[in-house]
């Protein structure tokens, strides 16, 4: 199942790692190990943030993906299910049933 993993990195700790010269090396190492579908880096609520798309074969893989960010950076990790257009298409019958049963009328 595909997820968007949102990793928020604490500013003080990442600043320290940048000064030490290990920040980029550690991020690169984690991403090479995890091999996500995509990874983007941005700011969210004033914090350094990575948005990483991963396809988990089993829920136990959450440990594989979250633990390195927690241990290396003291980061927080959020998980959000993510659908491709094909996934959304397969959900069409469920959407139609919900609209038919619960859709607003008028």
Image (spheres, grey):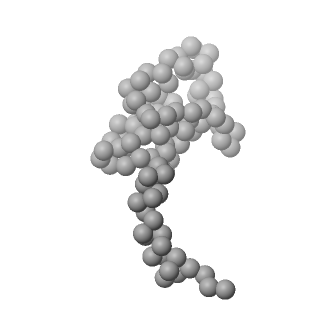
Residue 70 % position (x, y):
46, 36
In this rendering, the answer to whether 91 lies above or below 85 is: below
Residue drawn at the location 59% of the way across and 26% of the way down: 14
Residue drawn at the location 37% of the way across and 49% of the way down: 1
How many marks the image carries: the answer is 0
Residue 76 % position (x, y):
52, 41
Residue drawn at the location 44% of the way across and 35% of the way down: 37
The extreme right residue here reads 46
In this rendering, the answer to whether 10 lies above or below 86 is: above
Q: Please tell me which residue lies in front, 82 or 100.
A: 100
The answer to whether residue 53 of the structure is visible from this angle is yes
In this rendering, the answer to whether 62 lies above or below 14 is: below
The answer to whether residue 77 of the structure is visible from this angle is no
Question: Where is residue 44, by image quadrant?
Answer: top right
Residue 41 % position (x, y):
60, 32
The extreme bottom residue here reads 106
Q: Please tell me which residue lies in front, 6 or 97.
A: 97
- Tell me the quadrant of the picture where the C terminus can be found: bottom right
Residue 85 % position (x, y):
48, 51
Residue drawn at the location 43% of the way across and 54% of the way down: 87
19 lies left or right of 28: right
């Amino acid at each position: 199942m595909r997820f968007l993993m949102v990793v928020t990195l604490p500013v003080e700790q990442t600043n320290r790692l940048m000064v030490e010269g290990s920040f980029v090396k550690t991020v690169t190492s984690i991403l090479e190990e995890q091999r996500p579908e995509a990874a983007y880096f941005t700011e969210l609520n004033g914090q350094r943030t990575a948005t990483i798309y991963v396809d988990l074969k089993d829920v136990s893989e959450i440990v594989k993906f979250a633990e390195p960010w927690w241990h290396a950076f003291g980061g927080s990790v959020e998980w959000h299910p993510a659908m491709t257009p094909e996934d959304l298409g397969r959900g069409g019958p469920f959407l139609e049933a919900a609209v038919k049963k619960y859709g607003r009328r008028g």
